[in-house]
Image (cartoon, helix red, strand yellow):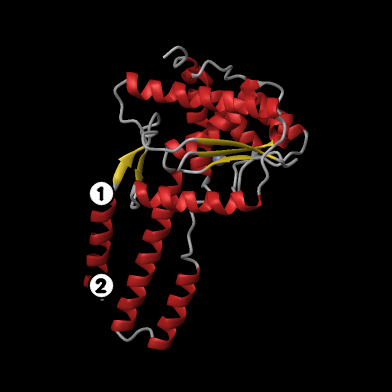
């Protein structure tokens, strides 16, 4: 049994080392088990499901304003990756920008490049810089492959649990019927979509990358913490689809810490 477990751990370690990559701009190592085409397909499917019930905004001026801010961030980052000779994590994404009818203060960006901004958010922000702060954060999740990372982690945990249970069953420590119950439970937990909630670490990283994106695109980075202060004062829920977020205080401190670094990216 013990020997078998070491073999399993060895296999997991090899898988992790093989699938290890680095997050653009922060350099953090992450494990990505899914291919870009898997993620694109799941993401497009999630978007189609969302689009079935969402209604596009009829406010042409506001739609235009949102498109300009999103495009400015996307183009600036694309140019930055190309000009700096870095691997471009935005390559192959299908950018699509929607403003939808809803008073909710919310926005998200799917890993395929579908950006959705809610009218409630566009009305809440005081200026384009604050809108760029939220959209930059959302695009950062896509650039940093956060969905792939979350799904990969969930898959690794699930396969490890399953293998350990099978080993336990093989050694007679777990009965076949108990194994069946465990497998059903794990299977039920295994219906992962691309809209898995992000971790706190990923949220703080998206704030960090988002701030750099704002600076590169020529937006005022100081407006990012100001927006979160305004949200906290208004008792507003932090925007984002199904997300667990760090506290407002932790988030504002994190943003302020990265402002000097982000400013050094201005004009790049
Ligand atoms: Zn986020």
Q: Residue at x 33, y 79 (%)?
A: 168
Q: Total number of numbered labels?
A: 2
Q: Residue at x 49, y 15 (%)?
A: 263
Which residue ends up furthest to the right in the rendered image? Answer: 234
- Picture quarter containing residue 7? bottom left
Q: In this rendering, which labeled residue sits more in front, label 2 or label 1?
A: 1
- Distance from Cα at disc 2 to Cα at disc 1: 23 Å
**Image quarter of the C terminus:** top left
- Residue underneath mark 2: 2
| Rendered location of residue 83, percent (x, y) | 33, 18
For label 2, the SS is helix
Q: Is residue 228 left or right of residue 3?
A: right
The answer to whether residue 3 shows anywhere in this view is yes
The answer to whether the residue labelled 2 contacts the one labelled 1, judged by CB atoms less than 8 Å apart, is no
Q: Residue at x 34, y 31 (%)?
A: 88
| Rendered location of residue 215, percent (x, y) | 51, 18
**Position of 97 relative to 226 (above/below):** below
For label 1, the SS is helix
Mark 1 is surrounded, within 10 Å at the Cα level, by few (under 14), some (14 to 19) or many (20 or more) other residues, namely few
- Picture quarter containing residue 29? top left
Mark 2 is surrounded, within 10 Å at the Cα level, by few (under 14), some (14 to 19) or many (20 or more) other residues, namely few
Residue nearest the observer in this picture, 179 or 210: 210
Q: Is residue 17 left or right of residue 220?
A: left
Which residue ends up furthest to the top in the rendered image? Answer: 267
Residue nearest the observer in this picture, 30 or 78: 78
- Residue underneath mark 1: 17
| Rendered location of residue 210, percent (x, y) | 51, 29
Q: Residue at x 33, y 49 (%)?
A: 35
**Position of 260 relative to 8 (above/below):** above
């Amino acid at each position: 049994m013990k020997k078998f477990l070491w073999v399993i751990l060895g296999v997991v370690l090899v898988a992790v080392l093989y699938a290890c990559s680095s997050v653009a701009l922060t350099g953090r190592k992450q494990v990505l088990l899914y291919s870009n085409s898997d993620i694109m397909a799941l993401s497009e499917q999630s978007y189609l499901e969302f689009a079935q019930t969402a209604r596009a905004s009829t406010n042409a001026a506001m739609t235009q304003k949102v498109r300009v801010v999103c495009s400015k961030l996307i183009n600036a980052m694309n140019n930055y990756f190309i000009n700096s000779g870095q691997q471009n994590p935005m390559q192959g994404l299908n950018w699509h920008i929607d403003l939808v009818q809803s008073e909710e203060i919310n926005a998200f960006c799917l890993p395929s490049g579908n950006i959705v901004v809610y009218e409630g958010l566009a009305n809440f922000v005081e200026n384009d810089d604050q809108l760029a702060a939220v959209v930059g954060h959302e695009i950062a999740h896509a650039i940093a492959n956060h969905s792939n990372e979350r799904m990969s982690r969930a898959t690794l945990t699930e396969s490890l649990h399953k293998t350990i249970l099978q080993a336990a069953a093989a050694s007679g420590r777990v009965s076949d019927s108990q194994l069946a119950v465990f497998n059903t439970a794990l299977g039920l937990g295994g219906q992962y979509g691309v809209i898995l909630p992000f971790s706190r670490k990923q949220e703080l990283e998206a704030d960090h990358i988002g701030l750099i994106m704002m600076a590169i695109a020529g937006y005022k980075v100081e407006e990012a913490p100001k927006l979160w202060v305004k949200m906290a004062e208004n008792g507003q829920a932090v925007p984002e689809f199904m997300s667990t977020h760090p506290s407002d205080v932790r988030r504002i401190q994190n943003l302020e810490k990265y402002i000097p670094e982000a400013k050094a990216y201005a004009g790049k």
